[in-house]
Every structure is written in structure tokens, then in C-alpha cells.
Image (cartoon, helix red, strand yellow):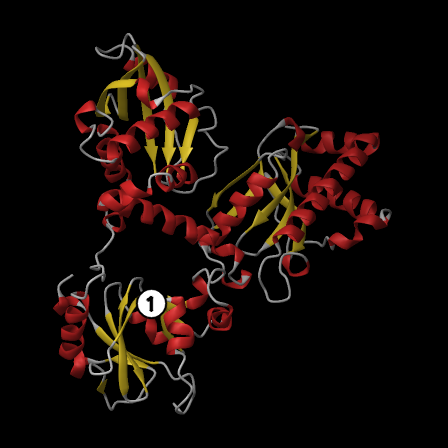
Amino acid sequence: MQDQMRNVWKIGCRWDDWGRQGTSIFEKVFVPTGFVFAYTKYCESIREGDLIAIADGYQVVAIAEALTPGSSLVKFDSSKLPAVAHDYFADPNCYGCKARILQLDENETFTYKKMGRFFQATSIADDVRRLYGKMMERPGTKEWRLNLFGWANKELAQDSFLCWLLSHANKSSEGQTPLHGVALDFICRLMAKCGLNVKTADIDNVIVDKQILQIDLAVRFTVAGAKHALMIEDKVNAMLYNDIEGYKKRLVSIEHYSDREIHPILIRTGDESSLGTDKQIAKFVRSDFLELLGDHKSACISSEILSDFAEHLMAAEEDVMRYLTMPVEEWDWSCWVGFYREIQNRFSQVPLDWKYVPNSSGGFLCLYPVWTDEVWVDSLAFYWQMESDKKQLVLKVMEVYTHHSDVRNKIVSELDAFLNSHEEWKDLRIARPDRYGCGYSMTLEKISSDCWFKNKDGRIDLEAVCEFFKRTFAFRDAFVAHWMSNDAFRNDIKRLAMK
């Protein structure tokens, strides 16, 4: 980035309302954490690449280079930072950015007599830029640069990256670049996802085709002389709606593919529920990619493109994992994605799905069961659903075609009677919703997250949440058993709810 394009800011490092000497947190917090921050929301003005003069009183002692845009510190994962920093990162009023901090030598520090926690330092901007350039020339100081995939983050760009990487599996790259080994290992891991164990030494004659017959990319190659091809659907976050079998038939109908064994596979680097329409295809997801790149760190060091891609994926992974450390009240979309993904993994015996549900308030993410036979009771879907906007579990009934309010009232009445006669479920604190709807899908009961979702400091207690989910599933099963044993109730529901 050209220096004149960088804003220059000043941040004070004395953590005291009056700026008293001896209260600096520069060496105690800024340096070991790699973050600079102040007790003001104006730090959100910082852009990636901006320069920041860090002042201890009137003395500028360091220059920092913003590696992220300014934001509230609670959005960053502080779990691996020194304990001394945790209080700052838990304070919603602390704003700042991750930064490369370059400490000035004693003869380089200078006086800047303008007080304030944070502001744009126009009058010293040229001096800061000059010092920054000088310091970046020091041996061992890595030049700052933007991540390519911060801009090339769409599926077409990812198609091109995959083609670029896989093309290095060709013999022409052997001995020329470490990327050759990465590409061969990549093919092996893709084939393993398709159920075939392949050795890198057996792979030959690799040719990559992009956007062939509306297929994102196809890779043809031989394995110990046998002809194979990977038919790759490449996604970032989008669901897979394509007719995979139809694409496969089309691919084998053309030259170079008609005599090959075709292996369809989905590569997804973003986050989308994995139990949707893509469940019948092999998948290579972000965690698989990170494992691949983690096993080829030397190749990442030698290739800025590969290094950028690895950093891009790691940043995406860290973003969704913030749910573990952020207060629940401050969770954003990514936090809910990370939480739902974890619950999916932990409850694989109870298949769960998640999706966006639009509404007039902007919509929410919900977690709900996959529509297996276990969800249905007398032709009605009866299930728990987690809703991100209200942070609550709701008990739902769906596929009610007629007499909506009568069906709802009948089930609610039976639920009330069941709860009143079974003390063992009182701890769930099941309550009626704020208001009842009336239609094809209706909420019957709710459980607010206040009593089970958070620990004392407002963060998620994941183990307790999982235990609570088990209890709610058990309650639902117990009530279904009661439902099925009550012939009079069943007959009333069938009479009212059927078309």
C-alpha cells in the first residue's frame, strides 16, 4: 500500500483517565498481545494498513501497523492471549485492532504534545510514515501486504485458485516447486473422500478443465495406469442445487472422459449446513483444507498465493469459533454458525440442520431436526427448534392444514397436563410463548436461554448446553410416548389436523 494512502492515528497507552505517569499498558498488554486499543468507539475508524503512533504521555514510543480494521475487542478470540489481557477483551467499550507493533529506538522517539486517547494525527503523519519506512528496512522485518483472498473471495475466484493449485500436480512442476507435492496430496485426499486410497507416486497425466459443461472444474489423471477423473463442484457458502448425476452423465459423454471412472466431490470453504441437498456427495470442507495446508507449511512459506489462501481460511475458521469466548449477548451471525455447527457434530445420532429464516425483522438462523421418521407424529412434525434472534428453544408443530388454533390449543392443553403430572421436567422451565401464531407451522412452548445457555460471565457453557439439549430431546420423546398411548387425544388430533 502506498504510504500516502495510509491514515495515521495516535493512541495513548496510559490506562488512566488523567493520563498519569506509570499507568502505561504498552509493554504489559500491547506488545505481548499484538493489539492496540483505546477506550473509545472512534477506533472503529481504523482501516487495515493504517499506521498508529503509540504515545506514552507526550512521547511517541512505537509505530503500529493495523492488520485488521478497528472493532470492539470482544469480537476477537482472546482465549490464547496472556491472562493480563482478558479483562480488556471482555470490555465492550474497548476498541482497537490487531497490529504489527514496531518499537522505536531511544534516539527515534519524539514528542507530540497533543492529548487524547485516540485521534487522527495529521500534523505528524509524514514523520510517522518516514519512520515506518525506515523501520521496515530493518533485517527480519516482513513487508506488510493485503491478503489476495480478501478481494478474490467469490466462487469464480476460488475456481481459478483450485485450477492453479491442481495444475501443479502435472509432471512439468516436479522438481520446480513445492506446490507439486501439495497438488498431488490434494488429489489423494479428494480421492480418499470418494472412498479410494491413492498414492501420490501412482498419479500421472494430470490435466485440469475449468467450466466444462457447466461443471465448475474437472481433473483427469491416471492412477497406476487406470483412468480417473474428479468432477468438482466448488462452493463458498452456497447450497448445492445441481443435478450431480445429470452432470456426471454429461461428462462421460464427451471426449477424454468417456473411458474414465468419474468421482463427484463438493469442495466448500465457507459455512453451510452439511445435511441439506448436498448430503449424497463426497465433501472436502474448510477443516480438510486447513489440515492439508498445515501439513505443507514449507510450501505455504514459499508461495504467497498459497499462504494467503491458508490465512484466509484460518481467519474464516477463527471467526466462527468466536462463539466460545464472546458474551452470548454480543454474538453475531458467525458465532451462531459456529455454535450450530458444533451442536450438529455432537448430536450426529439426532440429525440436525440449520438455515436462515427470513422475517420482517431481518430474519434469524434456526437449528432444527432433519425430517426423518422420528420427527413425525400422526402425520404432524413435532420438534424443538433453536432461534438465534430471541435466543430461545421453541417447541413446534408443523403440517397443520385445517383447524389451526383448535389443533394448537389441543396439543398445548395436553402438554400442560403432562407437565403438571410429571415433576421430573419442571427444571426445563417450559413456558408459553409471548403470543400464539395460527397457521401451517405454530410455536407451542418456549424455553428462554436465560436459565441454561450462559455461565455467570455471560459466555456459553457448551457442556451444560449439550446436557440441556439431551434433556429437551428426552422430554419430547416422553411426551410423544404419552401422545401415542392416549387414543382419545390421538383421534381428536387426527380429526382436526388432517386435510
Quadrant position of the N terminus in the picture: bottom left
- Residue 436 appears in the figure: no
Q: Nearer the viewer, residue 466 or 396?
A: 466
| Residue 349 as seen in the image, left or right of residue 431 | left
Q: Quadrant of the C terminus?
A: top right
Q: Position of residue 119 (x, y in %)?
A: 28, 80
Judging by the rendered image, the residue that carries numbered circle 1 is 70
Picture quadrant where residue 252 is located: top left
Give me the residue at 47% from left, 73% from top: 88
**Residue 188, position as x, y percentages in the image:** 36, 25
Q: Residues within 10 Å of mark 1 (few under 14, many from 20)?
A: many
Of the pair 492 and 63, the residue shown nearer to us: 63
**Whole-percent x and y of residue 356?**
47, 45
Residue 12 in view of the camera: yes
Q: Is residue 244 above or below residue 468?
A: above
* Rendered view: 248 above or below 136: above
> Which amino acid lies under the numbered mark 1 shown in the image of this protein?
Gly
Q: Secondary structure at mark 1?
A: loop
* Nearer to us in this view, 402 or 249: 249
Q: Position of residue 390 (x, y in %)?
A: 56, 56
In the picture shown, does residue 22 fall above or below 73? below
Residue at position x 82%, y 44% from top?
A: 418
Q: Residue furthest right?
A: 421
Give the camera-side residue of 286 and 241. Answer: 286
Instruction: State how many labels appear.
Output: 1
380 with respect to 13 (left or right): right
